[in-house]
Amino acid sequence: MPRISVYRLRHLAEVYTQEPTEHEPFSEILVRSGLEPDRIADPDARIDLLHEAGVIETACRSLDDKTFAARAALASRGPGTLLSYMVKASGTVADALELAKRFYAVQDPDLRLEISETDVAVRVTIESGVIPSRQYPRHREFLLCGLYTRTRQIVGPGLWPLSLELETDDLSHCEAIAELAECGVTGNRMGYALNMPAGALSTEIPTADRTLLGHLLSQGETQLRKRPEAVEGLSDKVASMIRGRLPGQLPNGDEVASELGMTRRTMTRRLSAEGTNFKTLVDTARCDVSKALMIQNVSIAQIAFLLDFADQAAFSVAFKRWTGATPARYRKAH
């Protein structure tokens, strides 16, 4: 399981404690999410990505406020990380995004940025191989609003208008975030994305410093080389086994547990300790493979067969549950 810096949770804790309404202590939020309260006291500590997602979702439920994650991210002053300094010293937005794609792994091994450009907009999406966006929507909104905030802080008013895309079909929630972020927010989209105007990649960054950037790049390369290999947890092994069978017939939980030399109950308990379960890992693998096959224009009926569904209708129902869109609508959007 990817292990990440605690800097985002430290900021979240600070914002949470300033909430005006009565709420449970943040230490209890951490415990309920599987973390020791003193874990985030050490700024150099690292935690599982799923624990971060769990804390954010739990905090929103505790406050009974779906916008809390977005509000916390929008209130960020910007992390003092090596990557943030690199981005500030970059020449253009294109340079900054390329650096972010390369060096994001230093602080978040799983999360990645995907950039696409058309004649009308530049679209930056946040992708994860571990955190299903439909299962942890507040966490994805937290990450997206953090990206939006850092973009505004680094580039300034010269890059406008910016807008956000969310997977949610809750349009009132989109309106609430739009008011908080002071930008357009569109719901019912495929994934979570930051949109910039056409030509944004060539926008110059006011704080560009080529000499400083050279020194920072040297440090960044050193950190990449020293980055410890991610410890493969049970969820990683199970996910790898499932993906290895696709396209094709899926193994059931008993078969996977047996291949791993344990009982189904033990596998279930250990996956739960890592914040996931067998069904979620199967759904995530099927969803990822189905998206790739759809982009390759494989027929929906054939995709259903390749992913071991009983029929096309069953696949369509599952795909809409995963992504919020029908297969046909997803294909049209891509």
Image (tube, rainbow, N blue to C red):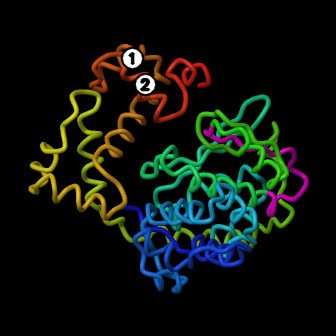
User: What's under tag 2, amino acid-wise?
Assistant: Val
**Mark 1 neighbour density, 10 Å: few (under 14) some (14–19) many (20 or more):** few
Q: Which quadrant does the N terminus fall into?
A: bottom left
CB under 8 Å between callouts 2 and 1? yes
Q: Which of these two is toward me, 73 or 91?
A: 73
- Residue 113 is marked as none
Residue behind mark 2 = 317
Q: Position of residue 294 (x, y in %)?
A: 46, 23
Query: Can you give x and y, in whole percent of width and height, for residue 215 in the image?
Result: 66, 74
Residue type beneath disc 1: Ala
Q: Nearer the viewer, residue 62 or 54?
A: 62
Q: Quadrant of the C terminus?
A: top right
Q: Residue at x 81, y 36 (%)?
A: 198
**The magenta stretch spans residue 156:** yes
Measuring 70% from the left and 72% from the top, which residue is drawn there?
21
Q: Is residue 215 visible?
A: no
Instruction: Tell me, for residue 313, which label it has, or none.
Output: 1
**Rendered view: 321 above or below 177:** above
Give above or below for 218 relative to 243: below
The residue that appears at 70% across and 69% down in the rendered structure is 213
Residue 287 rendering spot, x and y as whole percentages? 41, 34
Q: Secondary structure at mark 1?
A: helix
> Which segment is the magenta one?
152-168
| Residue lying at 37% horizontally and 60% vertically, measured from the top left | 275
Secondary structure under tag 2 reads helix
